[in-house]
Amino acid sequence: MSEKLNEIRKILEKHSEMLQNAIPLIASENITSPAVDEACASDFSHRYAEGWVGERVYAGTEYIDKIETICMELARQYFDCVHADVRPISGVVANLAMYNAFTSRNNGKMLIMPIPKGGHISHAPKYTKSGRAIYGTAGTVRGLEIEYMAFDNDEMNIDPEETAKIIREFEPELVLFGGSVFLFPHPVKELVDVAKEVGASVGYDAAHVAGLIGSGYFQDPLKEGADCMTMSTHKTLPGPQHGAITTDKEDLVEDLKSNTFPALLSNHHLHNVAGLAVALTEMLEFGKKYHKQVIENAKALGQALNERGMNVLCEHKGFTESHQIVLDIVNFKDSIGLGGDIERILEKANIIINRNLLPWDIKEGRHYMNPGGLRLGTSEVTRLGMGKSEMEAIADFFEQLIVQEKDPLLVKDEVAEFRKQYQSIKYCFQDSNKAYEYLKFY
Ligand SMILES: *Cc1c(COP(=O)(O)O)cnc(C)c1O
């Protein structure tokens, strides 16, 4: 048995070692601070506290209630909202609670961002229009009928005029903004009134951009008229893997609460609620500086890659207003390959990114396994203390691998050398800590 334990420990150590020497550019990921980790490794991970604070189904929750109350207060403060439920255990669970609340009364129709253009699988139907099974959460779990917003490929954003027409014709119960490729703020304020005209509620999935919103650098969907906002708490918001729902509308609070528990949860992962409380404290203190740098870095990385012969989308719009950029790598098809191939080449050099569908990929016969795009995010490298000059250094590595076709194993050594100076986590309370070096066996 102890041999298995050793094996497990070794694998975890290898994973940490890999990350200590890598450039982590996955847009949906981030790294938590030691203070967050400490809270997440607390005894709360052994406990149950079903229900709302003050209405628990379990005993022994005195201190759990205190932390959850603090966490809700911090979330209301950070997101400047009337109500924040910090119990959803992930972004998808938060979305399900939102679907429960807004699509149970009438026709079960929901309007979303098209999936190939950056919509998320948790918004998607069970089958595509062509009849192919995709098992999207909204269709599979809730049986929702899904229609897609119009999308402007040049602007990499929802087309407000065309989408207004679709809303009037389709008459959904829920119009859902937000997605996983998210370069620019969505036209929420432009479309709220149209949604209201047909009696639709308006939701906003802030899984990717929650931290940017909280720190005040991205649109505030609730202020633009959305009924509720759902999120993951671990993408631009550097908290533990968890979820949350916010609203400014008092009359929606009870329904949103009940559609979270008992509708979807038993345990709500109390240790992560504690970790989230710590992460929110950090972001109220350091978020302004951190997220400003995240966005500046994304723009700088876009510029640097573009200058080195890689086609970054939306140059005419400064590449991005979020933590993400998207590259069109189709012109490397005949040299080193497409998105999947390039993802693997970069991975060999310890540069960790996502391949990504471009909005026009499906039409041009490319699919998800080897698409025409790459998606990069700067949340984690910024947390490691990197700035504009480091974005240029990262772009140099991309140029060596993608344009100059240098051996990834040689580049891997240079990447490790480069990473030596960035081994601690910034924008948190203790910044002398070592990133990735902590393995927790409490
Ligand atoms: C990542 C993501 C989710 C899923 O969040 P989890 O916390 O992993 O469940 C939901 N919606 C969007 C738009 C996302 O990008």
Image: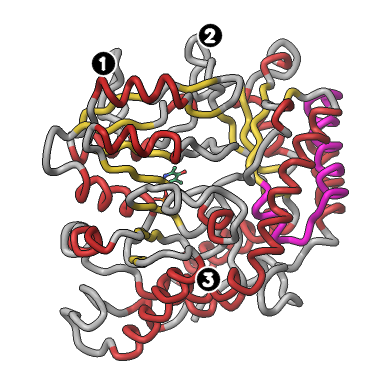
Is 379 on the left or on the right of 158, as rendered?
right
Q: Which residues are magenta?
A: 378-405
For the residue marked with disc 1, what is the amino acid?
Gly
Residue 45, quarter of the rendered image:
bottom left
Query: Which amino acid is tagged 2?
Result: Glu
Residue wearing tag 2: 364
Task: Give whichever of 190, 298 is nearer the camera.
Answer: 190
Q: Is residue 313 above or below residue 232?
A: above
The image position of residue 125, as x and y in percent, is 27, 29
Query: Label for residue 280?
Result: 3
Q: Which residue is mark 1?
A: 131
Q: Residues within 10 Å of mark 3 (few under 14, many from 20)?
A: many
Q: Quadrant of the N terminus?
A: bottom left
Location of residue 192 in the rendering, given as x and y in whole percent from the top left corner: 37, 39
Contact between labelled residues 2 and 1, with CB atoms less than 8 Å apart: no
The residue at 32%/43% (across/down) is 202
Camera-nearest residue between 34 and 94: 94
**Which element is circle 2 on?**
loop
- The majority secondary structure of the magenta stretch comes to helix
The amino acid sitting under disc 3 is Leu
| Residue 396 belongs to the span the image colors magenta | yes
Q: Does the rendering let one see residue 265?
A: no
What whole-number distance in Å separates the C-alpha atoms at marks 1 and 2? 19 Å
Going by the image, does 265 lie left or right of 89? left
Cβ atoms at labels 3 and 1 below 8 Å apart = no
Q: Which of the two labelled residues, at mark 2 and mark 3, occupies the earlier sequence position?
A: 3
Label 3 vs 1, first from the N-terminus: 1
Residue at 37% across, 67% down = 82
